[in-house]
Image (spheres, rainbow, N blue to C red):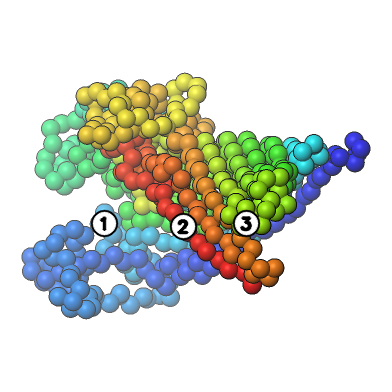
Amino acid sequence: MGNKKTVLRGGWSRSFERKNGVGLVLTPALGIGFGDLSVCTAPASGLGGTTKGSCIGFSDPTTAFRIGVDGNHITVPPLPAVSGGVIIPGQGSPSGIQPANANSVFESRDFRLDPHYVTGGSDSIDFSIQRDLPGKMILEVGYVGRWSRDLFGNIDLNHIPYMFTPKGTNQSFAKAFDAVAAQLQAGTSTRAVTAQPALEALLGGLSSPLCSGSASVWGKTQAPFASCTAAAAEFDAQNGNPFWPAHGAGALWTLLEPNFATGPMTLANTQVGSLDWSGSFTSANYHAGFVTLRSRAYRGLTFDANYTYSHALDNFGVTQECTGALPDAFDLHRSYAPSLFDRRHTFNLLVNYELPFGKGKSMATGAFADKVFGGWAVSGIYTIASGLPDMVYDSNACASEFGSTPSNGNSNGLIPIGPGTFNETRVNNPTLSTSGYGSGSTGGTPNMFQNPDAVVAGFRYPTFADKTLGFGRVRGPSRWNVDLGVGKLTRITERVSARFDVQFLNAFNHVMFGSGPDSFFSNQPGADLSTPGGFGVPSNQFNSPRYIQVGLKFNF
């Protein structure tokens, strides 16, 4: 159409994901009866009431087993014989609470596959309009879309039942938790928090060991508490990170659960620390519009320029190799947010220009001039892209903000207070205060925020009432790079030629900073409130320094 210079194109395809063999074979083998995850880092000496050879210690250098010094193999007691034909874990649980008929050791982590696990698939469409332009150029404008369903995902079957409402209270655990979290975040002392009916009922009233300050729970007797809610807040302050102010609901539940009047409601304290359940219950979408301008060998110039505006979203963009759980097992859409690879703007330019010298060109066409000046070409690749999504988060919550156990949860970001996005960029002299945020940016170390305190002030902790979270409201630094090349083709005879090339990768030796001490998944400086000194502080170089390649090739 259009004098045969315009073309319309479109297409549709359906593809299916490749299943990872590790997830299909090794993961189920890590379950009860195959490969119990019993952690042993050092053998006990037999002194102090310990059993010689039993597993102890995680970080004590005086008891750590030294391979090659203390021996080449740690002898540990065998697993107890299983009776009754059914494996019931729980022996030696960290809480001291276990089923009366437990016949196998407590598992720190268990992996299971959903029996309804299916192969995920995606539907892709694209359409474009292409127009031939003067100067051997082609302009193309188009759209690409992809809708993926039944993708891999992992939830924690030990996820806390935050909707649980104790009989006669008319208040769920979630509402009670949020009410106390808000008070603690506002600076209320642990003993002054307002009593919450759900917690008073769950913890058994002021006469219970926890609420009465009994040494059997606390280690040493505590002064009387005004409420079980206050006792729980103080218990978290003494034994947690604390978890509560950081909205670590899963971690707090695990800490308090041995004291519930109902008895444990999950297996985390009694039989299995974490129950990973892998299935096909996540989804993803990708939409992109693009503009491309190409030129092919017009007076020695060839180039390809492309701009893409895109948006990728998913429940939680991790691959099948990752066993981290979705933040909320009861509401998978809560973590629906930009994908980890979501770059909104991308521009690429590829250029090659053959200099107009030598045989067949407009200048220096003589035999000698052709050998000296002919065959030269310069080329370059320029790429620039906006930053990847990131977030402000608090790892004091142990990635359990909405109820996953701390052993396999994933944070998903604090909630932005206002509109807009905080974009990271190199700032050599950031505005710092006594708060400590970004304090690692001293002595010439840059920060990715002009004012770290202003970024912190732009976010609040999540609540169970929030339907979506804050991942993506911080964007990492933009990335750009220039590669250059110079080459010369010299014909020695009709059948023999030589090509000389010099390539400059990262030609301007442009430094792009990478992950900091609190980076999440995206290899860019992070923003973890629990490590204020590293807030926005880079710690390595994202790209490679400039290097030069020289090559000489003979063709015959």
First along the sequence among labels 3 and 1:
1
Image mark count: 3
In this image, 106 relative to 344: left or right? left
State the residue at coordinates (34%, 60%): 108
Circle 3 sits on which residue?
A: 368
Circle 1 sits on which residue?
A: 94
State the residue at coordinates (28%, 77%): 78
Q: Quadrant for residue 313, please give it.
A: top right
Residue type beneath disc 1:
Pro
Circle 2 sits on which residue?
A: 549
In this image, 361 relative to 329: left or right? right
Decide: is 472 above or below 11.
above
Q: Residues within 10 Å of mark 2 (few under 14, many from 20)?
A: few
* Front: mark 1 or 2: 2
Q: Nearer the viewer, residue 392 or 353?
A: 353
Question: Which element carries disc 2, helix, strand or loop?
Answer: strand
Q: Quadrant of the C terminus?
A: bottom right
Q: Quadrant for residue 372, please give it.
A: bottom right
Q: Nearer the viewer, residue 137 or 33?
A: 137
Label 2 vs label 3: CA separation?
A: 28 Å
Q: Quadrant for residue 192, please give it.
A: top left
